[in-house]
Image (spheres, rainbow, N blue to C red):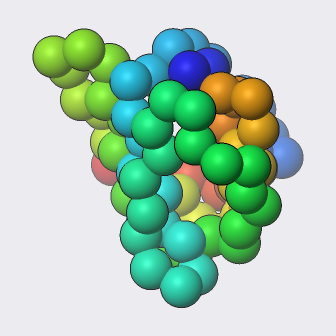
C-alpha cells in the first residue's frame, strides 16, 4: 500500500507500508492491504507505520484520512515534534 502524510507546511511521509494504524475520532483503527474505502476524521495521536520488519511512529495533531485502492492519504493539521 502507498501511504502519504501531508501537513499544511510540508510532506511528512511518502512510501510503502504493510499496515498503518491511525487515531480515528471513534478510536484507533488499522488499515491493511485491500481495505474497504473509508474517509475518517483523526484525533491527536500516533500514526504507526509498519513496513516489513520496521515500524515508524509519527505523532499528528488531528486531520483526516482517506483510504481507497490501496492508497492511504493523511491530511494532518500538524506534527508533534519529538
Query: Is residue 22 rendered to the left or right of residue 46?
Result: right
User: Where 16 sits versus 62, above or below?
Assistant: above
Query: Which residue, as the protein is rendered here, is positioned at the far right?
Result: 8
The residue positioned 24% from the left and 29% from the top of the image is 55
Residue 54, position in %: x, y?
Answer: 20, 20
Q: Residue furthest left?
A: 53
Which corner quadrant of the image does residue 24 belong to?
bottom right
Q: Is residue 13 visible?
A: no
Q: Position of residue 5 (x, y in %)?
A: 65, 36
Q: Is residue 6 left or right of residue 22?
A: right
Give the number of marks: 0
The N terminus lies in quadrant:
top right
Name the residue nearer the viewer: 55 or 61.
55
Q: Residue at x 66, y 48 (%)?
A: 36
What residue lies at 45% left-to-right and 38% top-to-bottom?
32
* Residue appearing at x 73%, y 57% in the figure: 38
User: Compared to 77, does 18 lie above or below?
Assistant: above
Q: Is residue 20 visible in the rendered structure shown here? A: yes
Q: Quadrant of residue 77?
A: bottom right
Q: In the image as oriented, which residue stretches furthest toward the bottom? A: 26
Percent across and percent down for residue 14 are 62, 19
Q: Residue 31 location, x and y as percent?
A: 48, 46
Amino acid at each position: 500500500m502507498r501511504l502519504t502524510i501531508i501537513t499544511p507546511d510540508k510532506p511528512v511521509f511518502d512510501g510503502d507500508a504493510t499496515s498503518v494504524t491511525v487515531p480515528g475520532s471513534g478510536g484507533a483503527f488499522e488499515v491493511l492491504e485491500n481495505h474497504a474505502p473509508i474517509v475518517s476524521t483523526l484525533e491527536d495521536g500516533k500514526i504507526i507505520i509498519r513496513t516489513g520488519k520496521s515500524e515508524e511512529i509519527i505523532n499528528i495533531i488531528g486531520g483526516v484520512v482517506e483510504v481507497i485502492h490501496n492508497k492511504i492519504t493523511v491530511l494532518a493539521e500538524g506534527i508533534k515534534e519529538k
